[in-house]
Image (cartoon, rainbow, N blue to C red):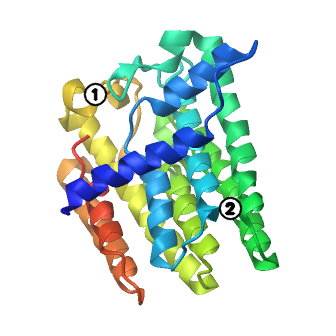
């Protein structure tokens, strides 16, 4: 099987795993559940659960304990997109080639759908305790939950979003340090979360988990710089969402600070270092290494 075929197979596996944990669309609160499921199942690369699963496999993980966390992190990622697309934030009408949640269900219901996904993510992740068999398993799940909360919260993704919003209002204060803080927290934090949880649940050593955190930082920052590049160079048809939104929203990006060529060079440097870290482990995961390259150098 070649990489693209394997990627397609694994993407379908990620979708099936996610779908198995999504709430049933019933009850008087059915509409918010429909909105949650609409946003979560509307395509996507399933990057974070796949990175989690592949890191778990690289460190020898074989049990079902990882699956609730795979679903949970995709729910958290999608809640953040639902809120990002709202008029109060990026005000986007398309996501993955489909109408955004607030366009279909209204702004109020989109807010609730995002809230619902965030809460349901932790409810889902806690199901991992049901598959734990030893005290060590319980400790791993508890540690993974801590990482999930921190990397998604005010010291992770939400912290990055906060600085991102303020940066739009005070462009003159946006330095490279501020921009990298945004990229590290808004984008890289969930990728770190995914890969670290995979390593933790597989029983990786502390120094290995730290290496994975650094690797995932590089992946996340490179991923976001590439996103900034695509916002300038791609199209709605290819990207599946409006291009030029950064300029429209007066955002300072790595491209506006450094230009396209230097931005591409930084993506390459970060990518190379990430691959070097992954290839340094005793049991290499060649699919994971290729996946990282594909994600960073993606065209959409």
Label 1 SS: loop
Q: Residue at x 40, y 85 (%)?
A: 283
Q: Secondary structure at mark 2?
A: helix
Q: Which residue is mark 1?
A: 243
* Image quadrant occupied by the N terminus: bottom left
Number of marks in the rendered image? 2
- Whether residue 263 is situated above or below residue 144 in the rendered picture: above
Is 115 left, or right, of 216 in this rendering? right
Closer to the chain start, of discs 1 and 2, is 2
Residue denoted by label 2: 147
In x, y percent, where is residue 55? 47, 70
Disc 1 crowd, CA 10 A, few/some/many (<14, 14-19, 20+): some
Residue drawn at the location 76% of the way across and 12% of the way down:
28
Residue plotted at (75% across, 44% down)? 123
**Left-right relation of 64 to 99:** right
Task: Name the outermost residue toward the bottom.
Answer: 282
Q: Is residue 60 visible?
A: yes
């Amino acid at each position: 099987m070649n990489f693209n075929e394997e990627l397609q197979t694994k993407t379908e596996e990620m979708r099936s795993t996610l779908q198995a944990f999504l709430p049933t669309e019933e009850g008087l609160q059915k509409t918010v559940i429909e909105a949650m499921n609409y946003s979560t199942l509307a395509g996507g690369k399933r990057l974070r659960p796949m990175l989690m699963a592949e890191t778990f496999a690289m460190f020898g993980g074989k049990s079902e304990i990882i699956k609730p966390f795979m679903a949970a992190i995709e729910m958290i990622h999608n809640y953040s997109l639902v809120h990002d697309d709202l008029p109060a934030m990026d005000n986007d009408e398309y996501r993955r080639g489909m109408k955004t949640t607030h366009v279909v269900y209204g702004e109020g219901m989109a807010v609730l759908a995002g809230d619902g996904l965030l809460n349901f993510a932790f409810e889902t992740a806690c199901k991992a305790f049901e598959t734990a068999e030893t005290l060590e398993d319980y400790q791993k799940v508890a540690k993974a939950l801590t990482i999930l909360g921190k990397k998604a919260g005010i010291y992770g993704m939400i912290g990055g979003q906060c600085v991102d919003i303020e940066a739009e209002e005070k462009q003159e204060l946006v330095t490279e340090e501020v921009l990298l803080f945004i990229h590290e927290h808004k984008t890289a934090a969930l990728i770190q979360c995914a890969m670290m949880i995979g390593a933790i649940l597989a029983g990786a050593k502390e120094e290995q988990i730290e290496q994975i955190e650094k690797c995932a930082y590089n992946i996340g920052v490179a991923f976001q710089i590439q996103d900034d590049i695509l916002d300038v160079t791609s199209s709605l048809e290819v990207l599946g969402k409006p291009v030029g939104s950064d300029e429209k929203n007066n955002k300072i990006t790595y491209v506006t600070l450094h230009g396209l060529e230097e931005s591409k060079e930084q993506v390459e440097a970060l990518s190379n270092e990430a691959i070097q870290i992954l290839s340094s482990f005793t049991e290499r995961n060649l699919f994971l290494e290729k996946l990282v390259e594909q994600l960073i150098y993606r065209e959409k």
